[in-house]
Image: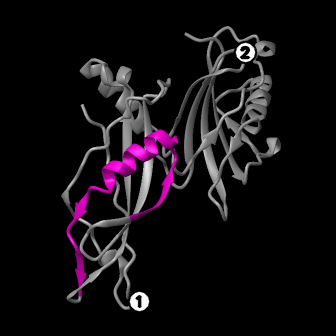
């Protein structure tokens, strides 16, 4: 079962007098990225890579501009597949245009692919729920009482990257059951100010204080040139 996804962005037109959004890159032939056999197993359902390519006037990829949000072994597998793609030339005003295109590849784990159909769709639906609302990056975290993260997901790993650190221990909270806190804050560079973290849904002041500290304990990587708004749903307490 394939969950490879394709995301096409507007190509860059050569002339200033032609709107760039008029350029479309329709595929003529594709090659599906294949998970590298030597890739180490991880706890993630899949690895996601975003590859940006230059496209020439004949619809052939000519070079790789950048690869976002995936380990090198998966990045190379994505590039090896995408450079073989062929596109219909973008012809505007009777002349071909060059431009760029961004393609997305998902490499599912063998365990993820082996799930029964209903469980597979359930997990896919869980990932879909994490799509962004507005401009905020949405992240879900689940942590053991010792602060170890057991689940992490993002609505768009290429844009809302999270480099996790171990959270502070929750033992002092003495939670008997799981508690969910919704956090919101803006990260400038990799800095999060604890007092600027908004907390809702969880009511206990000690839990709120922990949630703010936990948010600040992460390195939140934001796009160059600006700050990024985050919405984080954090599940605290013992594992079910």
Residue 158: x %, y % from top left: 51, 49
Give the number of marks: 2
Q: Quadrant of residue 213?
A: top right
Callout 2 crowding tier (Cα within 10 Å): few <14, some 14–19, many ≥20: some
Residue marked by disc 1: 16
Residue 234 falls left or right of residue 74: right
Residue at the image position 63 percent from the left and 52 percent from the top: 229
83 is higher (above) or lower (below) than 190: below
Mark 2 lies on residue? 146
Quadrant that contains the N terminus: top left
**Residue 11 in which image quadrant:** bottom left
Q: Measured from the top left, where is residue 56 in percent x and y?
A: 31, 73
Asked if one can make out residue 6 in the rendered structure from this viewpoint, the answer is no
60 displayed left or right of 159: left
Q: How is the image coloured?
A: one colour
Measured as percent of width and height from the top left, residue 104 is found at 38, 50
Could you tell me which quadrant the C terminus lies in? top right
Residues shaded magenta: 63-92
Q: Between residues 91 and 171, which one lies in front from this camera angle?
A: 91
Q: Residue visible at 58% across and 45% down?
A: 161
Q: Nearer the viewer, residue 109 or 119?
A: 109
- The CA span between labels 2 and 1 is 57 Å
The residue lying at 72 percent from left, 54 percent from top is: 189
| Mark drawn on residue 210 | none
């Amino acid at each position: 079962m394939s969950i490879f996804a394709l995301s096409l962005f507007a190509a860059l037109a050569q002339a200033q007098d032609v709107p760039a959004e008029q350029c479309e890159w329709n595929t003529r032939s594709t090659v599906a990225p294949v998970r590298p056999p030597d890739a180490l197993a991880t706890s993630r359902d899949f690895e996601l890579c975003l590859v940006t390519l230059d496209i020439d006037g004949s619809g052939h990829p000519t070079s790789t501009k950048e690869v976002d949000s995936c380990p090198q072994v998966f990045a190379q597998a994505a590039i090896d597949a995408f450079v073989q793609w062929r596109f219909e030339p973008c012809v505007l005003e009777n002349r071909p245009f060059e431009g760029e295109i961004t393609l997305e590849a998902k490499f599912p784990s063998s365990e993820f692919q082996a799930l029964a159909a209903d469980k597979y769709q359930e997990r896919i639906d869980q990932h879909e729920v994490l799509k962004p609302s507005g401009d905020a990056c949405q992240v879900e975290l689940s942590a053991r009482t010792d602060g170890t993260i057991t689940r992490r997901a993002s609505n768009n790993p290429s844009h809302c990257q999270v480099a996790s650190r171990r959270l502070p221990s929750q033992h002092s909270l003495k939670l008997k059951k799981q508690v969910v806190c919704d956090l919101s804050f803006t990260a400038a560079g990799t800095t999060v100010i604890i007092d600027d973290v908004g907390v809702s849904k969880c009511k206990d002041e000690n839990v709120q204080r922990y949630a703010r500290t936990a948010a600040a304990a992460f390195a939140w990587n934001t796009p160059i040139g600006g700050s990024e708004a985050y919405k984080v749903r954090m599940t605290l307490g013992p594992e079910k």
